[in-house]
Amino acid sequence: MKSLVVANWKMNPQTPKEAEELFRSIEGKTQGVEGVEVVICPPAIYLPLMIQRNYCSLGGQNCFWLEKGAYTGEISSLMLKNSYCKYVIIGHSERRIDLAETDGVVNMKIITALKAGLNPIVCVGETAVEREEGRAIARVEDQIERAFEDISSEDFLQVGSVNIAYEPIWAIGTGNPCDSKTALEMRLVAVERIKSLFKEKVATFRFLYGGSANVENAESFIKEAGYDGLLVGGASLRPDEFNRIVKIVSSVRKI
Ligand code: PGA
C-alpha cells in the first residue's frame, strides 16, 4: 500500500493560470517518487485544467450527499468521478464548523462517494476545548462511529481505500502541529475504532495526519506516529515545500 500525501488547496489560488502553474510544478516533481501517491484537491472549478496528468491523482474537496437533482451550487460525487477524481475529502473541520456540516451529513456524503467509486478521505479531530477538557479521544471515536453508521461491506465494493485523516482543529492553519506522541495516540484510537466497526476486511484503511504539516515535522508523523500519509493545507500552495514533504514521506516509508 502506498502512502498518501494530499494537497488541500482550499479556496486557493484565485486564477486558473495560477492553479495550472501550481499543478504543473507539483506534477512534474512527483515523477519517480516511490511509494507515495500524491493527490491534488483543487477547487472543483479548476479540475478540467488538470486532466492531462501523469503522476498525481485528483480529488474533490467536498461533495453533495445526493446523486443529482435540484441542489443549486452543489457538486455530486459522480460529477467528481466523471471529472477524473479518484478521491474526495469529506467532513473537513472548516466545513463542519463554517457550514454546519453534521456527522449525519458526513455519513450521507461517505455513502454517495463510495457508491460513485470515490475513495473518501474522512476528516476527524477535536477542538482545543475538547482536548483541554479531556474529551479528544471520545470526540474522535464518536466522529468515526457516526461517519460509518449503517455502511455495510457491500458499500465498499467500488473503492480501493478509505482514508481517515486525523486533523486536530487547533492545529489546522495555526503553525502549531500536534506532537508526535499525541498524534500516535490518536492514530491508535482511530485504528481501534475502525477495527471494532468492521470486523472483517471491507477495504484498505489508511490513516493520515493533517494540521500544520510541514517539512520540519513530516518525518515524525510517518516514522514516530506511524501515519500512512499527510493531508497538507498551507504548505501545498508552496510547490517547493510540498515537493520536499512528498520526498520525505517517500524516503521514510517505501512500499
Ligand atoms: P494546514 O491545513 O496544513 O494549513 O494546517 C490542513 C488541512 O486543513 O487539511
Image (cartoon, rainbow, N blue to C red):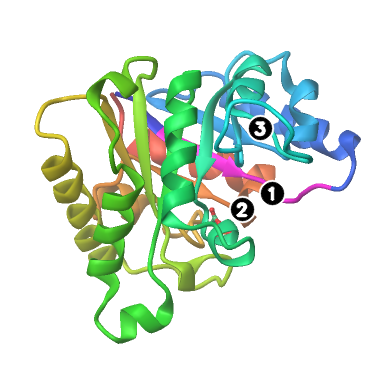
Do callouts 3 and 2 mark residues in contact (Cβ within 8 Å)?
Answer: no
Q: CA distance from mark 1 to mark 3?
A: 9 Å
Q: Position of residue 87 (x, y in %)?
A: 51, 29
Q: Nearer the viewer, residue 33 or 166?
A: 166
Q: Residue at x 29, y 33 (%)?
A: 151
Residue highlighted by disc 2: 235
Secondary element at tag 1 = loop
| Residue type at the position of mark 3 | Ile
| Ligand 1 is within 8 Å of the C-beta of the residue at disc 2 | yes
Residue 145's place in the image compared with 2, above or below, is below
Residue 230's place in the image compared with 31, above or below, is below
Q: Position of residue 218 (x, y in %)?
A: 42, 52
Identify the mark nearer the N-term, 1 or 3. Answer: 3
Q: CA distance from mark 2 to mark 1?
A: 5 Å
Is 11 magenta? The answer is yes
Q: CA distance from mark 3 to mark 2?
A: 12 Å
Please tell me how many numbered marks the rendered image carries.
3
Q: Position of residue 202 (x, y in %)?
A: 22, 24
Q: Position of residue 241 (x, y in %)?
A: 61, 48
Q: Quadrant of residue 154?
A: top left
Q: Which region of the structure is painted magenta? A: 4-13
The answer to whether residue 131 is visible is yes
Tag of residue 238? 1
| Residue 208 horizontal side relative to residue 24, left or right | left
Q: Residue at x 42, y 55 (%)?
A: 103
Q: Nearer the viewer, residue 120 or 112?
A: 112
- Which quadrant of the picture is home to ligand 1? bottom right
| Residue type at the position of mark 2 | Ala
Residue highlighted by disc 3: 26
